[in-house]
Image (spheres, grey):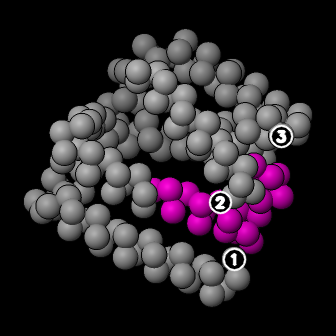
Amino acid sequence: MELFFGLVTGVLFGFLLQRGQVLRYDKQLGALRLKDMTIVKFMLSHIMVAMVGLYLLNDLGLVKLSIKSTVLGANILGGLIFGLGWGLVGYCPGTSVGAVGEGRFDALWGIAGMLVGAAVFARAYDGLLGTVYTWGDYGKITLPSLLGISHWLVIVVLLAAFAGILRLLERKGL
């Protein structure tokens, strides 16, 4: 049943990516050049919905959150590699799959990069455990646990901040 729900949510997310026009190369390039914030607005909107939904489901006992360790070395290195690939190809892994589905075969480079990156990571993982995965390991922390306050208070503040950012981007025509 979990796989079925994963498939349904994946198809729904892909549909929303397509309808939001974030699979388009010009939108990807515009985001990288900070000239078109369509992707930023799309992702902020989805983060807002997911944040409320996941914590509500968690509070109702329908899901259990699995908090991962905050490791600065791994996050920074992974972010740099991801950003470099996105900048070189013009697609991130998820949007490259969707773009190929729309017939944009230049996005196959993104899929190839994703597969090569996964293979290199799998091969290097054991070596990374003793190095990169130890740099700045803060354990399983969250903003609410760090601040010692209710997660709903953090969510409300983030929702207000994200809504403000979305409104600002709309006013600027980005």
Q: Is residue 141 above or below residue 93?
A: below
Q: CA distance from mark 3 to mark 1?
A: 25 Å
- Give percent across and percent down for residue 50: 41, 52
Residue matched to label 1: 174
In terms of depth relative to the viewer, which is nearer, 143 or 70? Answer: 143
Q: Is tag 3's residue or tag 1's residue first in the polypeptide sequence? A: 3
Name the kind of residue labelled 2 in the image.
Ile
Which residue is most to the bottom? 171
At numbered mark 3, what does the secondary structure look like: helix, strand or loop? Answer: loop
Q: Which image quarter is the C terminus in?
A: bottom right
Instruction: Give the extent of the magenta segment.
Output: 23-47
Q: Are marks 3 and 1 in contact (CB under 8 Å)?
A: no
What residue is shown with label 2? 39
Q: What amino acid is labelled 3 in the image?
A: Glu
In the rendering, which numbered label is found on residue 80?
none
First reached walking from the N terminus: tag 1 or tag 2: 2
Q: Which residue is mark 3?
A: 102
